Amino acid sequence: MEPVTVVESRVIPLDRANVDTDAIIPKQFLKTIERKGLGKHLFHDWRYLADGTPDPTFILNEPALANAKILLARENFGCGSSREHAPWALADYGIRVIIAPSFADIFANNCAQNGILLIPLAPQEVEELFVACRSGPLQMRVDLPAQRVHAPLQAYSFAIAPGTKEKLLLGLDDIQSTLSHRDTILAYEATRKREAPWLFQELRHG
Amino acid sequence: MAKTLYDKLWEQHEVLREEDGRTLLYIDRHLLHEVTSPQAFAGLRAAGRSLWRRDANIATADHNVPTTDRAAGISDPTSRLQVETLDRNCQEFGVEEFGMLDRRQGIVHVIAPEQGLTLPGMTVVCGDSHTATHGALGALAFGIGTTEVEHVLATQCLWARKSRNMRIWVEGRLSTGVTAKDLVLAIIGQIGTAGGTGYAMEFAGPGVAALSMEGRMTLCNMAIEAGARSGLVAVDQCTIDYLRNRPYAPQGEQWEQAVRAWRELHSDSDASFDREVRIDASHLVPQVTWGTSPEMVLPVDGVVPNPAQAPDPVRRAAWERALAYMALQPGTPIRDITVDKVFIGSCTNARIEDLRAAAAVARGRRKAGSVKEVLVVPGSGLVKAQAEAEGLDQIFLEAGFQWREPGCSMCLAMNADRLEPGERCAATSNRNFEGRQGTGGRTHLVSPAMAAAAAIAGHFVDVRELS
């Protein structure tokens, strides 16, 4: 996983609340058995017209925002389906940071697994950034170590859980570190097998 | 100290806790399906890892499977590859799978309780947000992403942070013709789709205790539509009666031992919740969604709202977008909205009780000529067999409905069942998002009885007024 430290980029202002993961990556692209290559399908139904050409009115197609890495949106971003294809598509497109008043829980977990930094700001702060975006492309600097967001006329601090911060800064994968607790997991299992043996029955394999 | 049900379940599964609250949680049951597992198995293979505990895992193909002639296989090559990849992965890693031709196959959230693979007190995860369903059995169940699927396969654990406690207290009982689906839609309408974000959501009170297990599953299933990863209902006699003699439920002395433990799975009477919401079920009427988020919901006797009356600018913009997408005008009575298709199915509403409720409405009636297609898709092969034993299939067929094979079907249209652009559907599923049932399709969420009533009338009606 690619680490996140400081991200400098223009901001894509996606002025919508409750953006769901079906909108981020529609179901027809979930049939893949790969993690890669979903960026071209990001926001497919909003981004492309029925004939497959880009919809010029959709913000992602604004030429000045090509290659932008920071997405700005309204509350409850990433609600709905647990599909990790949503952060895969965002990351593959190049999004490294999403700023919104709130995020759905499963989506937030999935972003932490894929090197995408989620920044919750107060609704009023998000509103200020949307207003700033109206007068032309807004350049922003996101500093994860300092937990600060800098725009030309604004700067905000943001909160992040220490474990998530470290994971993003170092680009860590969890499995190896979890397996270092192997003996603790085995000890837990041994206790549970005594207390609740029905949880450990063998399935009949056909 | 008094504990909530969620507190108890969480504590029983803590393997270790770090200083910042990050907890390694043990997972008892892991459900797998074809859409969110291939990259996880590929990750294991690439790292040379094996399964931590093979028998914690159970797999089935549900999202991509056709609901027509099963023997003919899957015609879409990408869907077929995904299902075949699941078969291959299960074979290679030794995971028990209910394959497409197995009569136990079905929607993962229908088959696990049905088989007794979900038990009270378990932690249950799946790469699917509707895993919340299993909380109806007093299990801590939540959806995860594919990286976490791989993590569970390799370690039988997940890193998680404890959510806050929320209780939805349901006073009164639902009246005839009003169902758990109407109740949960009304709850989402009240608290919003982010109302439960960061919480584990326990449903309790007389209105919940009076529900069947099927009804409780419908309720917990849509906890995620209120933002909560987990829904919960305390174990009671109804739960225990439901599980007795299920194929994978414990037997004999172990059953007695398990039941004793399960009886502790309820919130202590003096437990405190971080947030409590009360709703009176007795005055509730059938609900119909009008927009593109489950919180955009109204009683069937309501009218489509005017964005000018939205409580804030963000919602006004969302309502305007939703009305444009749904091609609806403010002030239109819900009853005047006509439907092109009807879908009765999904992990929300494809259990036997749901099919009985739809059949009770369809019996002796015919679908309206203006309705192009009514799909009835049972949640599992065993639900299908039970419905057929009760003659429900014949009632549906005589009403002009279609009787299909089990799967997720038109809830998310990954198989051939879908809406065409502009088509409007009464659906018993859980999401009315833009494009969910097919690009450009328009979804109205309702209960099975309300869906059947809309199929008969050609537009929404209050099912209680059908004589």
Image (cartoon, coloured by chain):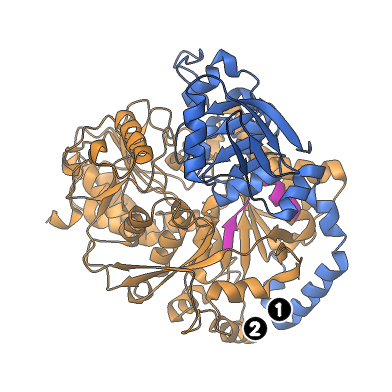
Chain colours: A blue, B orange
Measure the alpha-carbon separation of dots 2 and 1: 8 Å
Residue B185 appears in the figure: yes
Q: Give the range drawn in magenta.
A: B141-151
Q: Which amino acid does label 1 sit on?
A: Pro
Q: Which of B270 and B383 is in front in this view?
A: B270
- Classify A72 as above or below A170: above
Q: What residue type is labelled 2?
A: Gln
Dot 1: chain letter:
A
| Residue at disc 1, secondary structure | helix
* Above or below for B185 versus B200: above
Q: Which mark is residue A197?
A: 1
Q: Dividing the picture into quarters, in which one does residue B280 lie?
A: bottom left
Q: In this view, does A162 lie above or below B231?
A: above
Contact check, label 2 and label 1, Cβ < 8 Å: yes
Q: Which residue is drawn at 50% across and 22% down?
A: A59
The numbered disc on residue B254 is 2
Residue B96 is a magenta residue: no
Crowd tier of the residue under label 2, counting other residues whose Cα lies within 10 Å: few below 14, some 14–19, many 20 or above: some
Of the numbered discs in the image, which one, if any, rests on residue B118?
A: none
Number of numbered labels in the structure image:
2
Residue closest to the eye, A65 or B384: A65
SS type, badge 2:
helix
Callout 2: chain: B
Please report the residue visible at 53 percent of the width from the left and 45 percent of the height from the top: A81
The question of residue B147 being in magenta is answered with yes
